[in-house]
């Protein structure tokens, strides 16, 4: 279960974070029932994709998805894709979430305390926990994620009980079917932070449970939001969750939701600090960097320290307050979505290679067609939805630079390792 697996709790924490919640409510206010159906489809797609990934890892004897991608496209390409998607999105989330929590703390609880001061203290506190005790950080993750999930569920039930029938759900303001579909994929893209390998029995259940819980809570909260707040206010609001809590429970509900936002932000940041060392370890192994137990511990600490230092530097430089930060974050999450398709494309190539007798790969014809359909569906949906999406035109050069840097890092690292291993 997700509750027993810290990495599954990390994935759930990111999927329930305030930016994802805002995205879900905004798009549901625009698309109504169509958005919920799109989220259901995305959850089904991700569930099939994770099952395919687990089968592929088990059949090939590789412990993680990065090495599975590297088997087909090479380690440099696999690491580039993960740096430009999961790692980039994680760093942007770690920059914005503490500031959002600081804003809530300053506006609702302690007015004289600077919001950026709280943001830096929260980041420093979580970094200290990670560096002092990994087990303590895992227990804290379970606690924070549970608090955020219970709080969201409680506010949703209160809004449904006190509100009226959400008729706006059946009368959407927009009938564009592609934007809700893209939003559904983006909201649940962090499900791959949970382990995909099958090293021990039941390992894959946590990722599935996290996906189900996140999809259910996001859908429930979005429906509840429409029952207490007009869709026109929710569609463009940057704090729809606070409007919902106040509409359902008054000022006390607003304060309660503020505490949930802080817990959710902390859960997402702490979860990313748990997941990033795992990703960096997988990248190092893909580059054939020898990692002993002591070296793995050192790499984990260096990754945590570097990620927190990068997030703190971005906050100090004012990146979190930039009007374009939401666009950068959305573009990074979109690349995270495309990374799922990249993994399924790798599985397609492995299955085709098995049919030619070149190397072992999972499944048979059913697995081949399933992986092919999954990859084709995702890439087609993203390509068509983003064709006239202003976000890509505005952030295209920046994202191209991010991909270029992401490509340079593994190339330089690989050459460095080869030079010093001679």
Image (cartoon, helix red, strand yellow):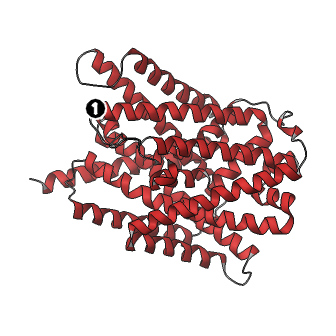
Name the residue rendered at 74%, 56% in the picture.
154
Query: Which of 406/174 is in front?
Result: 174
- Disc 1 on helix, strand or loop? helix
Return the residue at label 1: 60
Q: Is residue 412 left or right of residue 262?
A: left
> Dot 1, crowdedness within 10 Å: few (<14), some or many (≥20)?
some
- Residue 131 percent across, percent down from the top left: 39, 71
Residue 229 seen: no
Name the residue rendered at 31%, 40% in the picture.
67
- Residue 75 percent across, percent down from the top left: 29, 41
- Residue 48 percent across, percent down from the top left: 50, 30
Name the residue rendered at 54%, 30% in the picture.
378
Residue 410 seen: yes
Residue placed farthest to the right in the image?
164
Query: Which of 330/371 is in front?
Result: 371
Question: Above or below — where is 403 with respect to 47?
Answer: below
- Residue 381 percent across, percent down from the top left: 60, 29
Name the residue rendered at 70%, 32% in the picture.
37
Quadrant of the image occupied by residue 220: top right
In this figure, what is the number of numbered marks?
Answer: 1
Quadrant of the image occupied by residue 237: bottom right
Residue placed farthest to the left in the image?
422
Q: Is residue 372 left or right of residue 157?
A: left
Question: Above or below — where is 61 with respect to 391?
Answer: above
């Amino acid at each position: 279960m997700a509750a027993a697996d810290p990495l599954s709790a990390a994935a759930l924490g990111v999927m329930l974070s305030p930016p994802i919640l805002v995205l879900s409510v905004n798009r549901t206010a625009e698309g109504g029932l169509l958005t919920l159906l799109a989220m259901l489809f995305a959850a089904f797609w991700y569930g099939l994709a994770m099952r395919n990934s687990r089968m592929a890892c088990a059949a090939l004897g590789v412990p993680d998805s990065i090495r599975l991608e590297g088997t087909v496209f090479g380690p440099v390409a696999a690491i580039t894709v993960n740096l430009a998607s999961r790692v980039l999105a994680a760093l942007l989330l770690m920059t914005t979430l503490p500031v959002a929590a600081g804003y809530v703390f300053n506006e609702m609880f302690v007015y004289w305390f600077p919001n950026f001061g709280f943001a830096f203290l929260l980041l420093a506190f979580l970094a200290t926990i990670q560096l002092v005790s990994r087990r303590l950080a895992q227990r804290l993750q379970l606690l924070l994620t549970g608090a955020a999930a219970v709080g969201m569920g409680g506010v949703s039930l209160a809004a449904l009980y006190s509100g009226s029938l959400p008729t706006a759900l059946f009368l959407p303001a927009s009938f564009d079917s592609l934007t809700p579909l893209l939003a559904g994929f983006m909201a649940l893209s962090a499900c791959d932070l949970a382990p995909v390998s099958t090293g021990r029995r039941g390992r894959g259940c946590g990722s599935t449970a996290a996906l189900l819980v996140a999809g259910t809570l996001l859908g429930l909260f979005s429906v509840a939001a429409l029952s207490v707040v007009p869709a026109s206010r929710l569609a463009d609001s940057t704090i729809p969750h606070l409007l919902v809590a106040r509409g359902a429970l008054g000022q006390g509900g607003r304060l309660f939701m503020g505490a949930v936002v802080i817990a959710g932000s902390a859960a997402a940041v702490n979860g990313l600090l748990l997941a990033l060392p795992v990703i960096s370890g997988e990248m190092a192994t893909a580059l054939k960097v020898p990692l002993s137990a002591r070296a793995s511990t050192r790499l984990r600490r260096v990754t945590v320290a570097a990620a927190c230092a990068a997030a703190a530097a971005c906050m100090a430089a004012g990146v979190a307050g930039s009007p374009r930060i939401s666009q950068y974050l959305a573009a990074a999450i979109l690349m995270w979505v495309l990374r799922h398709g990249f993994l399924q494309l790798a599985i397609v190539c492995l299955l085709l290679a098995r049919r030619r007798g070149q190397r072992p790969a999972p499944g048979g014809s059913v697995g081949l067609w399933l992986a092919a359909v999954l990859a084709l569906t995702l890439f087609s949906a993203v390509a068509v939805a983003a064709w006239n999406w202003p976000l890509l035109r505005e952030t295209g050069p920046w994202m191209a630079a991010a991909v270029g840097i992401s490509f340079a890092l593994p190339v330089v690292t690989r050459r460095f390792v080869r030079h010093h291993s001679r």
